[in-house]
Image (cartoon, helix red, strand yellow):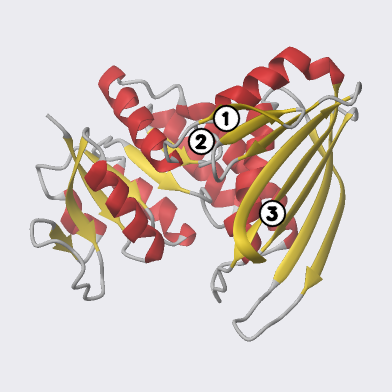
């Protein structure tokens, strides 16, 4: 039997999440918390005005939180009284302080809180991870170039939309290593739609591997490309949007599975096995990423 899942949030991203849940064989979208009228929600789905109302629904097995980051801590506090498994959209929270509090709740309650770090759940992530593990002592540089057109939102800086993914990806590729910040540069390009930003981060890993991340919300087409360069010139390139991996420009892997589908499959596996330990590294890397971004931008 599929698990009955509730969704908190009904914005643009929630519409995408809804479609992925409805396609997944292990989940049945049972209810949505939505404070505004929405005619696109199926009549078979219960609509609630608050998380408290939804939690009173005895048929609920798990929750997907896709609301504003500043509400995440409150929702987690309410949900953890029932120790109900959660998927939590990035960022973990809007401040480092509240992110650490979420981490504290997770450790104390030993419940499943799975952050959606879409790069980590990309079908190509395991191929990147294998390459890193095999060549770690030979890696000279890691480059990430990413962006899209938008989003242009007043409440959330676009770098929290895009930069969060790439910085957390580095933390998860090199979980045991120290990430040192060496340089940051911002270029503002305000346009008709609002806040256009190009942000360039420079890091180094253990003062040996140079990491450069360029993220922006002014690309014509959505793109996220990672390149790992070895000291002998060999390189691995990964198109994280189209799930293709190249070794020295030769295609070695491709997959059409969406990161959200992979996320839901992993979530189902964790619930089945009652495995809360898996989430720790993802929550920890999310906290570290929030700490970095908070230095430069308010969420």
Residue 143 image-quadrant placement: top right
Q: Residue furthest bottom?
A: 192
Is residue 111 visible in the rendered image? The answer is: no
The answer to whether residue 208 is left or right of residue 187 is right
Gap between marks 2 and 1 measured at Cα: 5 Å
Q: Is mark 3 on a helix, strand or loop?
A: helix
The answer to whether residue 122 is left or right of residue 214 is left
Between 122 and 292, the one lying in front of the other is 122
Residue 147 image-quadrant placement: bottom right
- Tag 1 residue: 125
The N terminus lies in quadrant: top left
Relative to 137, residue 84 above or below:
below
Q: Earlier in the sequence, mark 3 or mark 1?
A: 1
Between 218 and 264, the one lying in front of the other is 218
Instruction: Verify CB contact (< 8 Å) between mark 2 and mark 1.
Output: yes
The C terminus lies in quadrant: bottom right
Residue 67 image-quadrant placement: bottom left
- Tag 3 residue: 293
- Tag 2 residue: 122
Counting the numbered discs, the total is 3
Is residue 88 visible in the rendered image? The answer is: yes
Q: Which residue is located at x 36 percent, y 66 percent?
A: 11
Gap between marks 3 and 2 measured at Cα: 23 Å
Q: Which residue is located at x 56 percent, y 67 percent?
A: 156
Q: Which of marks 3 and 2 is nearer the N terminus?
A: 2
């Amino acid at each position: 039997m599929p698990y009955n899942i509730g969704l908190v949030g009904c914005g643009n991203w929630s519409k995408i999440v809804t479609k992925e849940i409805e396609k997944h064989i292990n989940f049945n979208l049972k209810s949505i918390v939505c404070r505004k009228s929405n005619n696109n929600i199926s009549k078979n789905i219960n609509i609630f005005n608050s998380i408290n109302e939804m939690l009173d629904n005895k048929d609920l097995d798990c929750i997907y939180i896709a609301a504003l980051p500043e509400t995440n801590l409150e929702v987690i506090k309410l949900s953890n009284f029932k120790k109900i498994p959660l998927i939590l959209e990035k960022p973990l929270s809007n401040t480092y302080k509240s992110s650490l509090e979420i981490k504290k709740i997770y450790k104390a309650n030993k419940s499943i809180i799975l952050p959606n770090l879409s790069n980590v759940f990309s079908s190509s992530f395991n191929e990147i991870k294998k390459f890193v593990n095999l060549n770690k002592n030979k890696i000279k540089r890691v480059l990430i170039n990413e962006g899209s057109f938008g989003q242009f939102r007043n409440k959330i800086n676009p770098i929290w939309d895009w930069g969060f993914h790439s910085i957390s990806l580095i933390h998860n590729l090199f979980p045991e290593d120290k990430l040192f910040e060496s340089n940051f540069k911002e270029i503002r390009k305000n346009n008709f739609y609002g806040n256009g930003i190009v942000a360039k981060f420079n890091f180094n890993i253990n003062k040996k591997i140079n990491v450069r991340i360029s993220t922006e919300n002014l690309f014509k087409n959505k793109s996220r490309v990672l390149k790992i360069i070895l000291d002998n010139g060999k390189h691995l390139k990964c198109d994280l949007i189209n799930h293709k991996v190249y070794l020295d420009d030769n295609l070695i892997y491709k997959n059409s599975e969406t990161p959200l589908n992979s996320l839901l499959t992993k979530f189902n596996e964790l619930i089945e096995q009652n495995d809360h330990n898996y989430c720790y590294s993802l929550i920890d890397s999310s906290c570290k990423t929030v700490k970095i971004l908070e230095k430069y931008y308010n969420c």
